[in-house]
Amino acid sequence: MAKNFNPKILKKLYKPYKDSSGEDNGQVTIIGGSSLFHGAPLLALKVASRIVDMVFFTSPEPSVGGVAEKIKSKLLSFIWIPWDEIENYIEKSDAILIGPGFLRFRSEKVPHGERHHICDEACVTTRISLPTKKNSSFFLEIYHHKKRLKNITA
């Protein structure tokens, strides 16, 4: 069931301790970007790096790797992972963000709304509704590990 977004919730969100390090605040893997959209995954990288200690980033699009390497010196808060090594990092991550900057179902030929995901018994789905400027809603589904949820929200 979708919930309407309440801005007051933002004040209750988990804030990492300044003296934390390593894996105290978790690890996230971000998979995104395309030949057309480079900015969306970079914005996700910036936000994630303020919440968790380790951010791993990869893209199936080779040109995104070039962009990531160029900005790495300015944004030191992520580790670029070659596409063929991503499974190792997914296994050790607490959360995975897939899709910022992907082209919409171009090669998969999957009808909009027909999506599949893998979520085992240790995983839960949270679906929230974010209001838009045009009085409609944008639905966001978040897949996360049950134990980590209490560390992220109040």
Image (cartoon, helix red, strand yellow):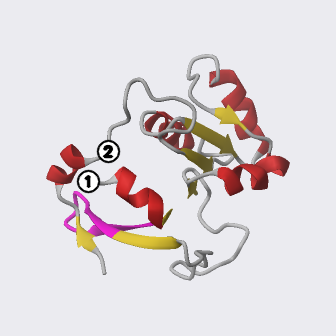
In this rendered view, identify the residue nearer to me: 101 or 76. Answer: 76
Q: CB under 8 Å between callouts 1 and 2?
A: yes
Position of residue 141 measured from the top left corner of the image (x, y, whole percent):
43, 68
Question: Can you identify the residue that label 2 sits on?
Answer: 14
Tell me which label, 1 or 2, sits earlier in the chain.
2
Q: Residue at x 32, y 44 (%)?
A: 14
> In the visual, does 52 lie left or right of 132?
right
Residue 136 visible (yes or no): yes
Q: Is residue 131 magenta?
A: yes
Residue at image position (75%, 31%) is 66
The residue located at (31%, 81%) in the rendering is 1
- Give the structural element (helix, strand or loop) at label 2: loop
- Please state the extent of the stretch shown in magenta in the rendering: 128-142
Kind of residue indicated by mark 2: Tyr
Crowdedness near tag 2: few (<14), some (14–19) or many (≥20) residues, C-alpha within 10 Å: some
Q: What amino acid type is highlighted by mark number 1?
A: Ala
Q: Which mark is residue 15?
A: none
Left or right? Give the position of 99 relative to 58.
Answer: left
Residue that numbered label 1 is attached to: 154
Residue 101 drawn at (x, y percent)? 57, 50
Q: Name the main secondary structure of what is drawn in magenta.
A: strand
Could you tell me residue 28's position as x and y percent? 57, 47
Based on the picture, tell me whether residue 140 belongs to the magenta stretch.
Answer: yes
